[in-house]
Amino acid sequence: MNKANKIQLALLATLLGVVFCFGQKKSKGDNFFFQYKYQQAITAYESQMTEGTLSEQQFLNLADSYFETNNFEKASEAYLEIFKKDTLMGGHHYNKMLQSISKTSDTERKNAFLATMSASFPKELMENMEFNQQLLENNAAESGLEYQIFNLTANSPQTDFAPAFYKDQLLFTSGRFQEDGKRYEPGNENYFNIYGARLQPDGQILDIQAFGELPSSNFHKATPYFSEDQESIFYVLSNTQDGELAFDPNGKNALAIGKQDIGGSFQLLLKDLSTSFYYPFYDDEASGKLYFSANFEDGYGGTDIYYVYTNNGQVMSAPINLGPRINSSGNEIAPFIFEGSFYFASDVFYGFGGMDVYKSNMEGEDFSIPINLGKGINSTEDDFGLIMRNEGEGLLGYFTSNRPGGKGKDDIYGFKVAEKPGLKTITFKGKVVKPYDASEVVDKAVIRLKDASGELLAETYSDEEGNYRLEIPWVEEVVLESTKDRYSKFTKRFTESDLEGKESLDFDIGISLYDDLVEEKEGQMVVKMKKFLFGNNNTQLTPEIESELNKVVDFIKGFPSAQLRIETYTDSRGGSSTNFRLTQSRSDAIKQYLIQQGVPSSNILYSVGYGEDKILNNCTNGVFCLEMLHQQNQRSLVVVLNDNILFE
């Protein structure tokens, strides 16, 4: 059964058939379906289908029932039949359809439908999918870490999940039988309760008892998280009124989030009779953000992860969705932050099986691409609810799984590992701008990352605001490139010392528009420079002249195939032959400087002094002119000879 729905089954207090719509006529199949009795629902719905009385919504319920009973062959066929009609199905059901197709190993069909539906998915989801599929196909997700994974001897035949650290104890949620505990029909377990147990040096637990710091309840208490900063337990509980389950107008009972101060008062933080909240996580280091999962109708899939701002635990904002980089068309649950990394579980269609644990690096308010933790923590079954802390020379952690070999429906597993789980990646992000005016951004520029041998690692385009973002598995050396039609090419190599210790690198790229750097003068295209003057009868380059010539150096760096001709002119004063020699020497001085600054000599085809051959005004020999008019004829130009074919 899909893990998020299992959690809803258990945690939504849908128990004893309490999630249903009062006053709405239902078939026998509907009654079974809304009580999560999926096998009985299949039998009833198939009977209706034979009789010709099955509605489209009931056919979708039948597809969901196949899915929840792991009959993925029939589920995929049913979803595909509904998909052809283009009705009822949204992103969450697309995810189930793709999961079903994946389970039947029909890769070609899955890829065909992905191509058809990709436009309806957020681009972040497709980027996440492509990145993770590439890693898993190439076995790049193998982090090389050696996990010591062990099943807790204290697991019961019932459901045990949601471990949490509490001082020297481990808290967890269980449906294990209690003598005085109420049971519910769908799970044949007790209502969930929170237990505590002493942690042992080997990671096992002893002396399990119901956790006595929380108010008593006959219904669900689950998924605890202890905040040292608040000295409080955050957890979920069934919505009740006067000691009995509380329902919304449609007869739905859901879960709220409460906060119990240790040895103090209880506060109800998040409650909506029509919405269930799961897995609270209080971030002590981020201005009191309270993360949680919820099934709001406007999410990206089934269950999404949100946060609210708090002040000493009191909710101070509306729920904020973490967005499509984290949330998918599937279900996302169990947020946990450790040393700048955001861990959570998702059943998005491109994972190993049901729920998998993912890791995303936190970048301020943004997140890197979530990376599947790979085999070990994840399996082909459901794996979720990961926590960890530093212990000795390594890490001690726990997670929940229903993988084969366990003691119950869901078991808690411990693990020890030397380093933080998760593939090491590095993210390059920033803006593409014009280097001579950083306020002018460049959109639709291509940005590439290549390895030391020139192999392409990743590629993207800048958005309308010039932003770009590329993430790759960590490498020791990488080359960052960027360009755009009629723009210069940017190239920068980052060595191991540049990248070591970094998970994210903010770097703005500067590329120049060719048309900004050239202008037409005297009937030809020249590199744009402010006019400069040599000293009288002098060939010496001044700092002012060198500053302008540096623009030519930058121009050739950006457009290395440009072919240049240096032209220098002077006024009519002085002898003609003297002026020719003077201007030739000035052109040669310009050429020599450019070569010294890195311009290849092969780019400078000609260096010519024209003397007084091309006077721009009436200041010819023997004509009296003001100095400013003579200076109009003193000029140096750097002509782009192949301007007309440079971009062909």
Image (cartoon, helix red, strand yellow):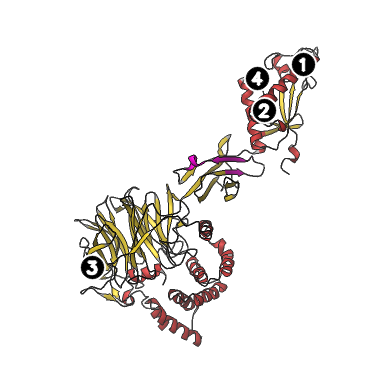
Residue 56 locus on image (x, y percent): 50, 77
Q: Residues within 10 Å of mark 4 (few under 14, many from 20)?
A: some
Q: Which residue is mark 4?
A: 541
What amino acid type is highlighted by mark number 4? Answer: Leu
SS for dot 2: helix
Q: CA distance from mark 1 to mark 3?
A: 102 Å
Q: Quadrant of residue 25?
A: bottom left
Q: CA distance from mark 1 to mark 4?
A: 17 Å
Q: Is residue 278 above or below residue 26?
A: above
Pointer 3 and pointer 2: residues touching (CB < 8 Å)?
Answer: no
What amino acid type is highlighted by mark number 1? Answer: Asn
Q: Is residue 84 above or below residue 545?
A: below
Say which label, 4 or 2, has the lower sequence index: 4
Q: Which residue is mark 2?
A: 595
Q: CA distance from mark 3 to mark 2?
A: 83 Å
Say which label, 3 or 2, has the lower sequence index: 3
Residue 264 locus on image (x, y percent): 19, 55
Q: Which residue is mark 3?
A: 217
Q: Is residue 373 left or right of residue 192?
A: right
Say which label, 2 or 1, has the lower sequence index: 1
What amino acid type is highlighted by mark number 3? Answer: Ser
Say which label, 1 or 4, has the lower sequence index: 4
